[in-house]
Amino acid sequence: MTDAWPKELRVSKDRKSLVVTFDNGERYDLSAELLRVASPSAEVQGHSPEQRVTVPDKINVEIAKMEPIGNYAVRITFDDMHDTGLFSWDYLIDLGRNKDTRWQAYLDELTQKGLSRDPVSRKHS
């Protein structure tokens, strides 16, 4: 658990990213796509590592709205109507600190599973 506290959460004008600034000076620009595919929801994460879902087709996803949950998290609603993930401050700072590693792991999973970030490039058999 971190002792960093978010000072500001700002959605970009194009709704494609969220900038989170913490009181310890850390600042992260997290893409809406990364937030969506790494959502801490049970729908994405499952109830065990084996149940985790690789979410394709989210290259164009946008942040529709955010709402605070108590003093520990924010609920992000995406324009695909996914809204069940509660992004705790600890989860957001962890995502920021490890975003390059998590992003590469996501891209590798897509490749391994024959999936794409872009819905129009989906192969139909």
Image (cartoon, rainbow, N blue to C red):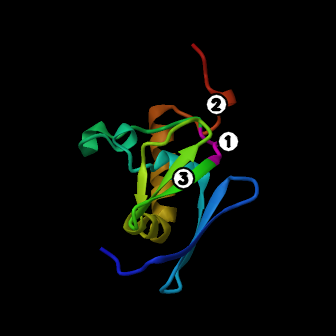
Toward the viewer: 53 or 6? Answer: 6
Q: Main secondary structure of the magenta part?
A: loop
Q: Mark 2 or 1 closer to N-term?
A: 1
Quarter the C terminus occupies: top right
Q: Residues within 10 Å of mark 3 (few under 14, many from 20)?
A: some
Cβ atoms under marks 2 and 1 closer than 8 Å: yes
Does residue 61 show up magenta in the picture? yes
- Single out the mark in the foreground, 2 or 1: 1
**Residue furthest right in the image:** 13
Amino acid under disc 1: Asn
Q: Earlier in the sequence, mark 1 or mark 3?
A: 3
The part of the chain drawn in magenta is: 58-63
- Horizontal side of residue 53 vs 9, given as left or right: left
Residue furthest bottom in the image? 24
Residue 119: mark in rendering? 2
Residue at disc 1, secondary structure? loop
The vertical placement of 20 against 14, above or below, is below
| Mark 1 Cα-neighbour bin, 10 Å: few <14, some 14–19, many ≥20 | few
What residue sits right under mark 3 in the picture?
34
Q: Which residue is mark 1?
A: 60
Most distant residue in the front direction: 70
Q: Residue 20: x and y, percent? A: 56, 70
Report the Cα–Cα distance between label 1 and label 3.
11 Å
Label drawn at residue 82 = none
Determine the secondary structure under disc 3. Answer: helix
Q: Quadrant of residue 58?
A: top right
